[in-house]
Amino acid sequence: MSWRQSTGPVHRVLPMPGTLLRQAIYAALTLIGFVWTNYYLVQFTIATKGEFTATNLLNFDLSAFIEQVWANPASSFVAVDLTVALLLVITFIVTEGRRLKLRFWGIYIALMFAISFAFGFALFMFVRERKLAEIAVSDPTP
């Protein structure tokens, strides 16, 4: 909660209902999206390189990864579903990033490819929620 002074008496400006809860959820999902997805990336690196080292991670076998993504109908279904979701989310990030005038909104798209979809999108949603709360506090009129 924040306090601000207007020309009249000091009054309290409350954040939007649920804002703090949503921020906590998005922060937790950002952490989960980093840790859980990278656990499997480490497992893949061990399976293809024999051990997990920084060198092996930097020499990531992208062709083997893509081959395993499309290895069977179940994994192909997940790959197609995530690809469509990724395209929708990129559109959402571009639109919301511009609308809310978020600084460096393109970094979240890069993070979805560099780290994981779950990490980049959850981080964007966390930052977006903070921006919406900031806007609500600075202009509390509906």
Image (cartoon, helix red, strand yellow):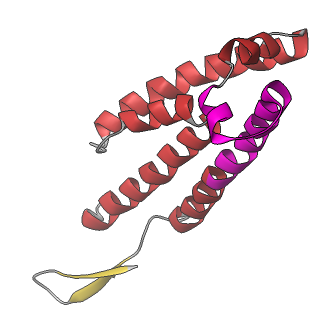
Image location of residue 113, percent across then percent down: 55, 28
Query: Which sits in the foreground, 98 or 28?
Result: 28
Asked if residue 42 is positioned above or below residue 22 in the image, the reply reads: above
Confirm whether the magenta stretch covers residue 48: yes
Which quadrant would residue 116 be assigned to in this image?
top right
Where residue 74 appears, x then y in whole percent?
89, 16
**Which residue appears at 33% of the width and 62% of the height?**
134
> Which residue is found at the position 78% from the left and 10% from the top?
67
Query: Hey, which quadrant is residue 117 in on the image?
Result: top right
Q: Is residue 105 left or right of residue 83?
A: left
**Is residue 47 rendered magenta in the image?**
yes
Q: Nearer the viewer, residue 79 or 46?
A: 46
* One can see residue 39 in this view: yes
Please name whichever residue, 12 or 59, is drawn nearer the observer in this view of the structure: 59
Identity of the residue furthest to the left in this view: 7
Q: Which residues are magenta?
A: 31-59
